[in-house]
Amino acid sequence: MIDIYETEFRKADLNLLVVFAALMRERSVTRAAVALHMSQGAASAALGRLRGLFDDELFTRTRTGVEPTPRAVELARRIEPALGLIHGAVTDRDRFDPATARHTFTLGMSDDLETALLPRLLHATAALPGIRLAVRQASRNTVAGMIDRGEADLGVAAAPAYGAEHRSRGLFTSGYTCLFNPRLLPLEVPLTLDDYLAHPHLLISYDGRRGIVDDLLEARGLDRRVIASTTHFTGAALQLATLPALATLPAHAATAYADTLGLATSPPPLPMPTYTVSSIWHGSRTDDPAHVWLRRLVYEVARTGEF
């Protein structure tokens, strides 16, 4: 066995790893300093020592803060779980107390899921003054990469694409709902296929070209008139407040938009698939007490929602 006290490890200040984790989470020297209750000068000095320790720049400056280098991303995969284990050993407890903890959790999800889940998550954590939630935009195709790069602690996506090093848990089943402004389009509910095709549509698509509705209609030899496209579900819903058009979007978000903006919902006039929304995380975080608490929180909030 290697005696760690006779190696270079004894030269390392483990407090620097805490600063490293804060920089990965906050993506800003200033915000990391605030989170750790230290001066910005001390945080900058710690970053300089980290660079010397790992012989890498680790974080490069951007207009909004700092971004990790590939070396930093790789280190983060091992350092953050290790810090959780060290904390448990030092405090003689292998648990996470959200009532007293100061912790920022970053969630990766698309804006429709943020609309459905974030208000419920904020309500559930309202009495926990040290818990902060941050959401970063993600899709089913990007969320695993964000987790690998340390950009998100937990992802939430519809049928996320992930590898053997990831873990996943189903949260709820969703489908699709039509959304429109009844003051501008006084249509009968449920919509008929004729009404659906007779009015203009807003398309929500990452490539801006077509969506699942277009594929289903094409299989029937039909087409719809798309007047605009956007990559954000919320953006489409806001447009419907003043636009006589239809949008077809995930049911879990349509209900929230309808309640907030005074819009109407209807089942689609053609059969559409349902799908499972799941949480996804890196396997190395599975036994981290803080991460266990986060996963349970998201699961319970999702399971008690009406989607």
Image: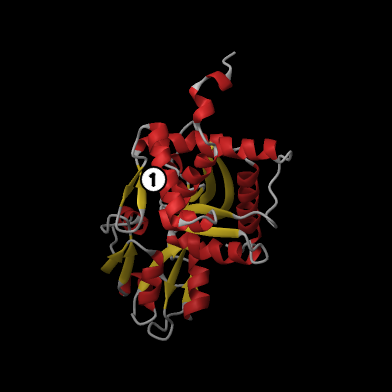
Which is more toward the observer, 87 or 49? 49
User: Furthest-right residue in view?
Assistant: 92
Q: Quadrant of residue 51?
A: top left
Q: Is residue 146 left or right of residue 133?
A: left
In this rendering, is residue 106 above or below 230? above
What is the crowding at mark 1: few (fewer than 14 residues within 10 Å), some, or many (at least 20)? some
What's the residue at 50%, 41% (across, down)?
Answer: 16
Which is more toward the observer, 204 or 95? 95
Q: In which quadrant of the rendered image does the N terminus lie?
A: top right
In this rendering, is residue 216 above or below 84? below
Question: Could you say whether the residue bearing mark 1 is in a helix, strand or loop?
Answer: loop
- Total numbered labels: 1
Q: In which quadrant of the rendered image does the C terminus lie?
A: bottom right
Please name the residue that numbered disc 1 is placed on.
141
Q: Is residue 280 left or right of residue 185?
A: right
What's the residue at 55%, 34% (across, down)?
Answer: 284
Percent of width and height locating residue 294 = 61, 50
Colouring scheme applied when the structure was drawn: secondary structure
Percent of width and height locating residue 258 = 49, 75
Which is more toward the observer, 251 or 117? 117
What's the residue at 39%, 42% (across, down)?
Answer: 48
Percent of width and height locating residue 253 = 49, 65
In this rendering, is residue 273 above or below 76? below
Percent of width and height locating residue 185 = 38, 82
Which is more toward the observer, 268 or 48? 48
What's the residue at 53%, 39% (across, down)?
Answer: 80
Instruction: Tell me the kind of residue under disc 1.
Output: Asn
The reply to whether residue 97 is in sight is: yes
Q: Is residue 163 left or right of residue 236?
A: right
User: Furthest-bottom residue in view?
Assistant: 183
The reply to whether residue 175 is in sight is: no
